[in-house]
Amino acid sequence: MAQDIIMGVDVGATGFKGGLVDIKKGEMVSERFRLETPAPATPKAMAKTFKELVKHFDYEGPVGLGFPAIVHNGVSRSASNIDKAWIGTSIVKTFGKDFKGSIHALNDADAAGIAEMEFGAGRKYQRGTTIMITIGTGLGAALFRHNELVPNMEFGSMYLKDMKKIAEKYVSNRVRKDQDMSWKDFGKRFNEYLLHIERIFSPDCILLGGGASKSFTEYEKYLEVEATILPAKLLNKAGTVGAALYAYQQAQ
């Protein structure tokens, strides 16, 4: 396989999405393959799903893995939407067992942000402060200062003013669906969250990814922040592309 073709895997609370990526062009060169995230999402069960994904592509090289947790030195340090057994567990060792290639793990929102900054909507904002927010099961976030990633920014776990639950339990794509919210109601609630982010970080640009980003035009008019707000260009491929690019960089 060509040296510039790397496998990326975007691990989410509901699905594993993987594919082969041309990391020079930021493009998928295979069909994206998806498997359901097991329930419960224990280390053993998720490792089995990863093994099935790799087998599908008959791949043995370096793999970039975007993971839904704080990731430090390949170890999961949180578990908001997966089994708590992941806390303190090595992602690299768990997924790397019986795999001949190398595993390079990072936070899933960080992976999506890397892709958008290199190949997507963030390319014009590589100077200054840019924040990527993924709106899915929870709220993921990636922070970039002059295109340098500050890893593991868990903005979905912060508390909004006068609230007793964290932000992603108040507004996310899952919350929108569970509460059958209109796009207007979602937009106004999400705007509260963005205003809080803006007060703290004063970003030049906020990029929106994840499932709800595909319907950006439905709630765009309810967002009243000063930063430029743009939907991610790579959409649901961002996590996979960014993970592959990260693996390539780490393997050099």
Image (cartoon, grey):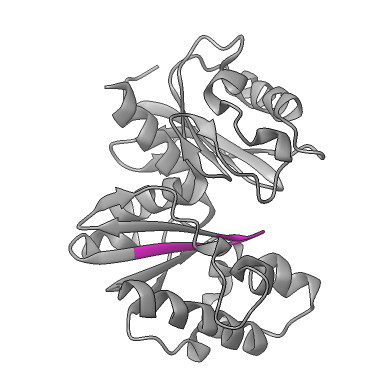
Give the image location of residue 238, x and y in percent: 46, 50
Q: Across the whole image, how many numbered discs are drawn on residues?
A: 0
Comparing 43 with 37, the one in front is 43
Comparing 64 with 86, the one in front is 86
Up-down relation of residue 155 to residue 84 (above or below): below
| Residue at 48% in and 29% down | 74
Apparent side of residue 139 relative to residue 130 in the rendered image (left or right) = right
Give the image location of residue 53, x and y in percent: 64, 27
Q: Is residue 116 magenta?
A: no
| Residue at 31% in and 49% down | 149
Q: Is residue 132 magenta?
A: yes
Comparing 229 with 78, the one in front is 78
Give the image location of residue 245, x and y in percent: 36, 36
Up-down relation of residue 57 to residue 101 (above or below): below
Apparent side of residue 84 relative to residue 77 in the rendered image (left or right) = right
Give the image location of residue 22, x and y in percent: 36, 34
Apparent side of residue 252 relative to residue 114 in the rendered image (left or right) = left
Q: Quadrant of residue 78?
A: top right
Which residue range is magenta in the image? 131-139
Apparent side of residue 220 relative to residue 16 in the rendered image (left or right) = left
| Residue at 71% in and 48% down | 14
Comparing 211 with 26, the one in front is 211
